[in-house]
Image: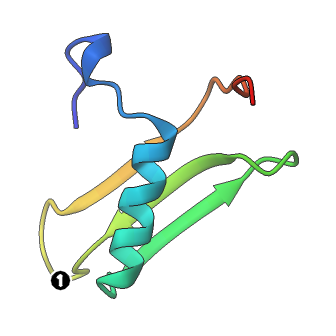
Amino acid sequence: MVVQSLGEVPTIGGLLEELEQARRDNADKAEAEYAPDGHRVLIFLDHESDAIDDEALYVITVYEPGDG
């Protein structure tokens, strides 16, 4: 996904839903890497390793916990 505007930036919650859905769908890869405080810093999805252009890599570089 190439983000054209801030309105297109996915939320972390949305990315986590996508990750869990990929795991339920038995994607070939549905992985996350975590920061020491437990939030995700990288999400990698590859639904079919033999397919071209179905991979997604999300890198979370700025994170501020919300209120609540």
Q: Quadrant of the C terminus?
A: top right
Where is residue 17? Give x, y as percent. Answer: 41, 58
What residue did someone put label 1 on? 50
Residue 40 visible in image = yes
Residue at the image position 29 percent from the left and 83 percent from the top: 25
Seen as rendered, the residue at the extreme right is 36
Q: Is residue 34 above or below residue 61?
A: below
Residue at the image position 48 percent from the left and 55 percent from the top: 16
- Disc 1 on helix, strand or loop? loop
Residue at the image position 17 percent from the left and 83 percent from the top: 50
Seen as rendered, the residue at the extreme front is 68
Residue 28 visible in image = no
Q: Residue 5 is drawn in which quadrant?
A: top left
Seen as rendered, the residue at the extreme bottom is 26
Where is residue 22? Give x, y as percent. Answer: 34, 73
Instruction: State the residue in front, 59 or 25.
Output: 25
Q: Quadrant of the N terminus?
A: top left
Q: Amino acid at mark 1?
A: Asp
Q: Residue 30 is drawn in which quadrant?
A: bottom left
24 to the left or right of 1: right
